[in-house]
Each structure stands twice: as C-alpha cells, then as structure tokens.
Amino acid sequence: MNKASILYNLQYGEQKPDIKLLFESDSTKEIRIVFREGQLMKEHKTGFPITVEIFEGAIDFGVEGNVHKLVKGDIVALAAGIPHDLLAMDDSIVRLSLAKSDTVQRVKSVLER
C-alpha cells in the first residue's frame, strides 16, 4: 500500500511551480504540482500518456493551441506526444499521474526552459 497526502507540507514556489513526487506504485508515479496564480508550465510533450487532476484552483490547459478551462475536480487524460501547457488562473494544486517509465526529472525540466 502507498499513502500520501496531496496537502501535506504544501509549498508554493515564488518563481515557478513546485513539483513533488508523492509516491510510486507498480504502474504509476503520482506527482503534486503547486502553482501560484499566473505561473506557467511552458508547452511540452510527454513520451507516455498522462492523467491530470485539478485538486484545487483553476488551470488553463492548452492542448495543441486550444485552451481548456479546468477547475477543481476536473480530470483529463492525454496521450503521449501531444503538445500541452498549463497556466494557473488561481493558486492551484494539480495531481499528475505518470507512467512508471516516465521521470519526475523530465517534468521538472519543463520549468527550466
């Protein structure tokens, strides 16, 4: 059994979103991304499918040039290789589910561009 709290030890980064690995299971990595209003994860692609859940706040989720307004409780799945970006419209907490073969470092590297 794996257990984590999406709210425990919550930190907002001043310059960029804060990314934290919550836990790994046999098939996924569960990540928390904490955004301040206005923070952006620039357009990027993944090598694996992902699932994104808006736990708190509101995110403009850009997919191939189209913006989807996601709010608390919304969950989306995205296939591998699709360009997407995230812009926080409010202070937000996002849960990102990655394939086991994907890496947290890849997610963090999006913020370094």
Image: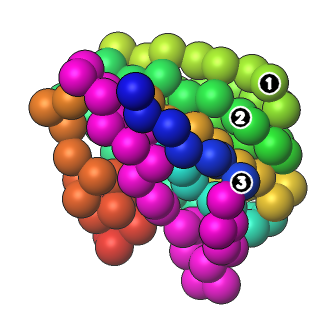
107 relative position to 105: left or right: right
Residue 19, x across and y down, in percent: 47, 61
SS category of the residue bearing label 3: loop
Relative height, residue 45 to residue 21 (above, below): above
Q: Which residues are magenta?
A: 8-30
Query: How many labels, in total?
Result: 3
C-alpha separation, residue under disc 3 versus residue under disc 2 = 13 Å
- Towards the viewer: 113 or 92: 92
Hey, what amino acid is under mark 2?
A: Ile
**Viewer-nearest residue: 47 or 22:** 22
Image location of residue 33, percent across then percent down: 56, 54
Residue located 54% across and 44% down the image: 4
* Label placed on residue 14: none
Front tag of 1 and 3: 3
User: To which residue does mark 3 refer?
Assistant: 7
Scheme of image coloration: rainbow
Mark 3 is on which residue type? Leu
Q: In the rendered image, which residue does mark 1 sit on?
A: 73
Residue 103, position in %: x, y? 21, 46
As measured in the structure, the alpha-carbon distance from the residue carrying label 1 to the one carrying label 3 is: 15 Å
Disc 1 packing (10 Å; few <14; some 14–19; many ≥20): few
Q: In the displayed orientation, state which residue is furthest to the bottom.
A: 14
Residue at label 2? 54
